[in-house]
Image (tube, rainbow, N blue to C red):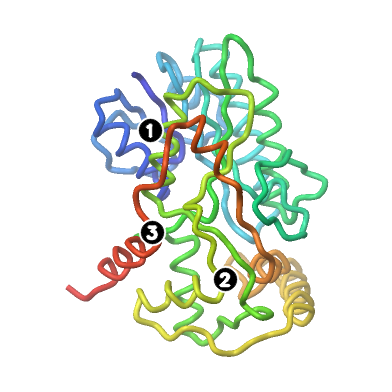
Amino acid sequence: MRVLVTGASGMLGRATATALIERGDDVTVLQRRPASLPCREVLGDVADPGVVASAVTGQDTVVHLAAKVDVTGRWAEYERANVTGTRVVVDACRRAGVRRLVHVSSPSVAHGGAALVGVGAGPADPARARGHYSRSKAAAEREALAADSAGLAVLVVRPHLVWGPGDTQLVERVVERARAGRLPVIGSGAALIDTTYVDNAADALVAAVDAAVHGEALVVSNGEPRPVAEVIARLCRAAGVPAPRRRVPVPVAWGAGAVVEGVWAATRRRDTPPLTRFLAEQLSTAHWFDQRRTRSVLRWTPRVGLEEGFTRLAAAYAPG
């Protein structure tokens, strides 16, 4: 199969492209900077119609992962990368006769702040989603699903909190803050959250390339909910840094996040803030999902459990 993977310089994009290459697919990757993978590579902006058209031409399937994933930045940046970029990819797929589009989204597109306990994939809602990233991904998901048709089968996959060796989004930020003593436990730390080891998320995306189902969204996770304080402590232990001991009440953390966001916006700082309202909410609210529909229609189950994942992460951090 001829498959285009956008965003292959990121951890999950790279793992997905590698899995497709290893099973014998003819893979092309599209991203801003070289991914150094053994396949055809197109460099450029996913919101550039010319670049995307060049990458999409001749493909059977597109796996669209490219996105701006951050907690800071102007709305225009998120809108261009996530909403316009998805629109450009969809249009290019239609023009090139691509038969299948796997659009990678996020469970946060359906999270309005309340706990999510054993639920399925609710509808993406830009009006209720929290923060620029979630709102832009919700709008992008709607764009993708609206294109589902007999000619272009669109399936949305929402991997939840993907992590593993080389992760710069979740693991690296947790470790850096813990090492600096700037990582408190928000609230009790008892809220159950689910996560996804990167190899499992990549396997699910490969399964989505092959699946017959389309026109819906599926949440992907390990299906092993743990208290958020335990997950953070295990990540810290794997990296050899002390786990957080200080606790901050949820209202205090939320208020502090609001103040920090205001300062970062007023001063136009580009670095990652120590706390945001979204982060305070995510670290104090339960979010885990019913995986029965996902596993049934994708014919997929995670092959790396949390314990093995933590062991692999520790090995990656081991000296030498």
Residue 127 coordinates in the image, percent (x, y): 82, 46
Compared across the picture, whether 19 is left or right of 191 comes to left
Indicate the amino acid at tag 1: Val
State the SS at label 2.
Answer: helix
Q: Quadrant of the N terminus?
A: top left
What's the distance in space between the residues labelled 1 and 3, CA to CA? 21 Å
The residue tagged 3 is 164
What's the distance in space between the residues labelled 3 and 2, CA to CA? 17 Å
Disc 1 packing (10 Å; few <14; some 14–19; many ≥20): many
Q: Which mark is residue 301?
A: none
Mark 1 or mark 3: which is in front? 3
Residue in the picture at 65% in, 67% down:
279
Residue 133 coordinates in the image, percent (x, y): 66, 51
Q: Mark 2 or mark 1: which comes first in sequence? A: 1
Question: Residue extending furthest left?
Answer: 320
Q: Quadrant of residue 145?
A: top right
Between 211 and 240, the one lying in front of the other is: 211
Q: Mark 1 or mark 3: which comes first in sequence? A: 1
Indicate the amino acid at tag 3: Gly
The residue tagged 1 is 29
Compared across the picture, whether 204 is left or right of 136 comes to left
State the SS at label 3.
Answer: loop
Indicate the amino acid at tag 2: Val
Disc 2 packing (10 Å; few <14; some 14–19; many ≥20): many
Residue in the picture at 35% in, 44% down:
15
The residue tagged 2 is 228
* Marks 1 and 3 in Cβ contact (< 8 Å): no
Residue 174 coordinates in the image, percent (x, y): 49, 72
Residue 138 coordinates in the image, percent (x, y): 70, 41
